[in-house]
Image: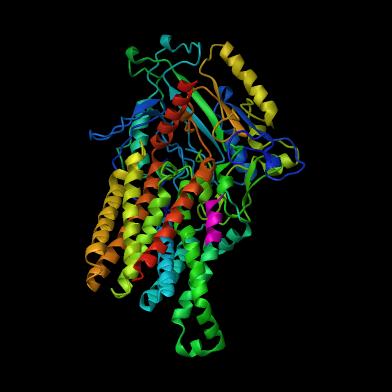
């Protein structure tokens, strides 16, 4: 029996879950440095898995019309606009009539209304924002003038566009799986985490157990839904739909050990090219969830992409929490006994 | 392009307006601003994705907060009922047994109706999973329920049924069954704290050390308070002691909990949750004073004190529940503490 059953590194995830003979652990390496934001992954995922449509509105957040992962969005392409270049790249904007990317304007339009949303905007992202808040603002989208033509040369900035396809992390220690009281969530022989829809009774515990805010309960259906890493496809030796559809191989599917080596090589390559801000996220088996089955190469801090910087599986604290609860229970029992023993006059 | 928003299909725990804590954020670094009010915690500077929450807000409704209260009440009153039974206090025993079953039935209703698929509630009984406090809690309630229920049914039997063979048998078994419920009650009262803390929700996870004590205190206060409301002063002595100890414990543990919290303490102090928690503490403190000063002398004073304790306990549960929900809606409660943890680790290297 392995020492790290609740948190920390774990070599044989599927074996720990009871699979005696099993294929190697598989996962995704999503290299966001080559993502072009085409959203083919989102479309392929919806098509293959019959995930319901949940709105096609642009959200005022660059070209993001998905918002975040949820029950009806198992891939989410994030779009981040920043006034800085990538690495030593010269975007050449200094010589062009470029203006600010409109970032403060965009945020000012979106953020106050997010606060008014029923779940702070954490409900499925593709719904339009609730009415109210500040008046709609002209964001210049779509614009027919050259960027910056109307603003003047003094407002020119550098610019880069970060795109990243987010997905369920299929954690080594999965918060959703640990707290599921029905056994609906289970660890597959591939080391991935999947919801059995015929078992799930929609208790919603997994929604609060996930440190990444991935899994959610589907409205009208009542059951929890998330990425299955195309359990049906990989069982037949196919790669998941999103990876299959990705035109730039930003989404790479494979055996986790090999993906990790590949990611390390890519990171070293980018650092050599002067992209010092490149970093791996979820690669480290020593992190708070024991490493992710689906990990990423990012070009900025994780929180900029909407990812938690240092997620931890809640189960990590289970032993200490039960000890405290035991002490409290003992105090409760003692108070009850003392009340009657002392009160017997 | 602007489509009318579809009507919400189900009510969720976090509906309603959010407070004016307008943390202005977008991708890149921004400062969260609160209207110039002085705070202990320095203003947080952090990045986020257009101010979107990192976590999903709990899908649990108010029913889960109501369950937390009813479960505590069921546990507390079953202890009072068993004690009253063993020490010959029939007019304390009877209402507490019935109250315990009533609170348990309400608990089950709240728990089952909050499921996305209520007709599948029995899927909880497929497994016993130590890593899932909800699974552990299911089995704790399964151990608690039969005893609490049977003891109450024994009280409610009409005289004709009581004379039958089954009735006489149940009459004889009521005491051991009531004691079995009381023996399980500490687990019923305390596991709900782990249920909340065993999540990624900052407002629940970060109070994991104190919450069990807050919740058992709240359970004892409500159980004892219920006994004070229902039983004559002469028999309610132990209920008063139990309630007073519980109320005092709840107030102290709740204060310690709130004092120790860092940034996420905001959600416990500010806005709607702050109001709930202040009201809870006032009611519990008033109930405690009344229990000590009035309840031993006056039936009306005892009833008023008991009601104050029950109300304080209920508001405590709603306060803690909603604090957690609020902490998931603003990304700063996720990003800032995690970033500090990372920085501290980097500095330690």
* Residue B59 shows in this picture: no
Quadrant (top left, top right, bottom left, bottom right) of the N terminus of chain B = top left
Among the 4 quarters of the image, the one containing residue A95: top left
Horizontal relation, residue B170 to residue B326: left or right:
right
Horizontal relation, residue A177 to residue B265: left or right:
right
Which of these two is toward me, B168 or A159? B168
Provide residue B255's location: percent of width, then percent of height. Answer: 31, 46
Identify the magenta region.
B132-140
Which of these two is toward me, A61 or A229? A229
Q: Main secondary structure of the magenta part?
A: helix
Provide residue B261's location: percent of width, then percent of height. Answer: 36, 39
Provide residue A267's location: percent of width, then percent of height. Answer: 59, 19
Q: Residue at x 27, y 62 (%)?
A: B308
Examine the rendered structure and indicate whether residue A1 appears above or below residue B90. above
B72 falls in the magenta region: no
Which of these two is toward me, B75 or A52? B75
Examine the rendered structure and indicate whether residue B100 appears above or below residue B259. below
Horizontal relation, residue B28 to residue A78: left or right:
left
- Residue positioned most to the front: A345
Q: Residue at x 46, y 59 (%)?
A: B186
Horizontal relation, residue B323 to residue A197: left or right:
left
How many discs mark residues in the rendered view? 0
């Amino acid at each position: 029996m392995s020492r790290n059953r609740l948190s920390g590194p774990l070599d044989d995830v599927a074996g720990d879950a009871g699979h005696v003979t099993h294929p190697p652990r598989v996962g995704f390496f999503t290299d966001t440095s080559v993502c072009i934001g085409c959203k083919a992954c989102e479309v392929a995922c919806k098509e293959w898995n019959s995930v319901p449509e949940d709105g096609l509105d642009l959200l005022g957040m660059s070209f993001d019309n998905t918002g975040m992962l949820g029950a009806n969005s198992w891939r989410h392409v994030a779009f981040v606009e920043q006034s800085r270049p990538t690495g030593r790249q010269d975007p050449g904007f200094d010589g062009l009539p470029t203006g600010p990317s409109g970032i403060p304007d965009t945020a000012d339009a979106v953020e106050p209304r997010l606060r008014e949303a029923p779940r702070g905007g954490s409900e499925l992202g593709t719904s339009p924002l609730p009415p109210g808040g500040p008046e709609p603002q002209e964001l210049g989208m779509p614009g027919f003038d050259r960027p910056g033509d109307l603003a003047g040369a003094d407002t020119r900035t550098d610019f880069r566009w970060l795109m990243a396809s987010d997905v369920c992390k299929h954690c080594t220690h999965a918060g959703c799986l640990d707290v599921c009281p029905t056994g609906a969530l289970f660890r597959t022989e591939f080391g991935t985490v999947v919801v059995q829809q015929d078992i799930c009774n929609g208790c919603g515990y997994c929604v609060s157990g996930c440190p990444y805010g991935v899994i959610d309960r589907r409205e009208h259906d009542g059951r929890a839904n998330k990425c299955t890493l195309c359990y049906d496809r990989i069982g037949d030796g196919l790669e998941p739909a999103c990876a299959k559809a990705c035109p730039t191989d930003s989404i790479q599917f494979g055996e986790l050990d090999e993906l990790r080596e590949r990611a390390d090589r890519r990171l070293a390559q980018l650092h050599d090219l002067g992209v010092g801000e490149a970093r791996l996220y979820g690669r480290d088996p020593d992190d708070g969830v024991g490493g992710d089955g689906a990990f990423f190469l990012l070009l900025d801090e994780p929180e900029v992409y909407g990812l938690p910087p240092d997620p931890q599986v809640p189960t990590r604290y289970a032993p200490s929490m039960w000890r405290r609860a035991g002490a409290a229970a003992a105090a409760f029992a003692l108070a009850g006994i003392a009340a009657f023993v002392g009160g017997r006059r | 392009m602007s489509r009318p928003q579809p009507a919400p299909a189900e009510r969720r725990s976090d509906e309603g307006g959010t407070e004016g804590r307008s943390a202005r954020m977008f991708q890149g670094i921004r400062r969260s601003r609160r209207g110039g009010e002085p705070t202990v915690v320095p203003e947080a500077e952090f990045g986020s994705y257009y101010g979107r929450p990192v976590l999903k807000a709990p899908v649990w409704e108010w029913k889960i907060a109501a369950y937390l209260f009813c479960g505590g009440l069921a546990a507390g009153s079953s202890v009072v009922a068993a004690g009253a039974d063993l020490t010959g206090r029939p007019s304390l025993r009877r209402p507490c047994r019935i109250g315990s079953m009533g609170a348990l039935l309400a608990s089950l209703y709240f728990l089952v109706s909050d499921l996305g698929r209520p007709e599948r509630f029995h899927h909880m009984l497929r497994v016993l999973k130590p890593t899932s406090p909800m699974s552990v809690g299911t089995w704790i309630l399964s151990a608690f329920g039969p005893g609490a229920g049977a003891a109450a049914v024994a009280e409610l039997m009409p005289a004709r049924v009581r004379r039958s063979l089954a009735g006489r048998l149940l009459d004889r078994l009521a005491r051991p069954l009531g004691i079995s419920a009381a023996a399980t009650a500490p687990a019923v009262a305390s596991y709900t704290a782990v249920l909340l803390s065993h999540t990624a929700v900052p407002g629940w996870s970060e109070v994991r050390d104190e919450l069990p004590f807050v919740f058992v205190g709240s359970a004892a206060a409500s159980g004892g308070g219920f006994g004070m409301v229902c039983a004559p002063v002469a028999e309610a002595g132990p209920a008063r002691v139990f309630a007073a100890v519980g109320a005092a414990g709840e107030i102290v543990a709740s204060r310690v909990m709130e004092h120790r919290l860092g940034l996420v303490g905001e959600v416990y102090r500010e806005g709607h949750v702050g109001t709930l928690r202040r009201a809870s503490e006032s009611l519990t403190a008033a109930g405690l004073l009344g229990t000590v000063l009035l309840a031993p002398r006056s039936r009306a004073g005892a009833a008023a004190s008991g009601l104050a304790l029950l109300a304080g306990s209920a508001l405590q549960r709603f306060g803690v529940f909603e604090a957690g929900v609020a902490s998931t809606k603003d990304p700063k409660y996720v990003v800032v503490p995690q970033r500090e943890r990372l920085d501290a680790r980097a500095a330690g290297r």
